Amino acid sequence: MGTIVSFHAHPDDESIGSAGTLARAAAAGHRVVLVFATRGELGEPVPGVLADGEQLAVRRSAECYDSAAVIGAKRVEFLPYTDSGMMGEPSNDAPFCFWRADVDHAARLLSVILDEEEPDVLTIYDDNGGYGHPDHIQVHRVGRRAAELSAVPVVAQSTVNRDWMTRGIRGMAKSGQLPEDWVLPALDEPTFGKPESEITHRVDAVDFVEQKKASMRAHASQIAPDHFLLAMPDPLFAMGMGVEFYVVDPLPSQAATPDLFEELFSPLR
């Protein structure tokens, strides 16, 4: 069996972006490891969720372990950086935030875990971090460098296939499968995900959407029961969240392709 290490910026990113892939890997007997760059200190807690005096970073750290249990991950680690906040905010200049971290130094910290685990696949984000968040962009940079240092065979960049989402939602709307009051999210922003032409692989995780939902619910400080993703009709959630997309560049040589990668990741073309 193989190992997949999934590197994320904040608690709850794993549940939204790659929980299906990770749950499918764990169900097949592979080892799954979660690594977070920060503890999400600057997140916006769901009103009324935190107890008096409860620190958001502590709560979000604990939620990672609940999510890991749902997914089937066997190890959870945190790098020693703080949340940088959204792009352009003053928090981007905080001395210990992840956005300001030296890429080589942060990559060496991550590579310690990679050397211990010897993963077949490392998942990170695409070069724009999925939607332009500074910590997500830094995950891409640090993850790529750490993979070089530790000679990880495959680096899979999680992304959103905005063409897939647009086709699916418009098709369901046309056929009357969406509730009348359901608000269509903006999917045509150039900073959101990637066009299908730039995506190389997909992971079919439709059979694991309930685990993905449970992983999201584990992050109750950030994802309320009425969050638009959890409020999606079941068919729309299965369509939009049950297939996860990745950019794999460069592709491994045929001789060096791990079995785990071939088992889980299907070429898009």
Image (cartoon, rainbow, N blue to C red):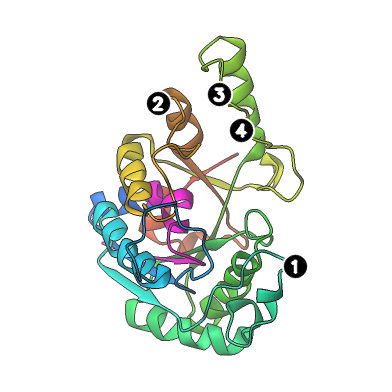
Q: Which residue is mark 4?
A: 164
Residue 3 visible: no
Percent position of residue 250, x then y = 62, 63
Does residue 8 belong to the magenta stretch? yes
Q: Amino acid at mark 2?
A: Asp
Q: Which residue is mark 2?
A: 234
Cα distance, mark 2 to mark 4? 17 Å
Residue 268 visible: yes
**Which of the marked residues, 2 or 4, is nearer the chain's N terminus?**
4
Percent position of residue 44, x then y = 52, 58
Magenta extent: 1-21
Q: Amino acid at mark 1?
A: Gly
Q: Are marks 4 and 3 in contact (CB under 8 Å)?
A: no
Query: Front-most of 204 and 193?
Result: 193
Q: Nearer the viewer, mark 4 or mark 1?
A: 1
For disc 2, the neighbor class at 10 Å (few under 14, some 14 to 19, many from 20) is few
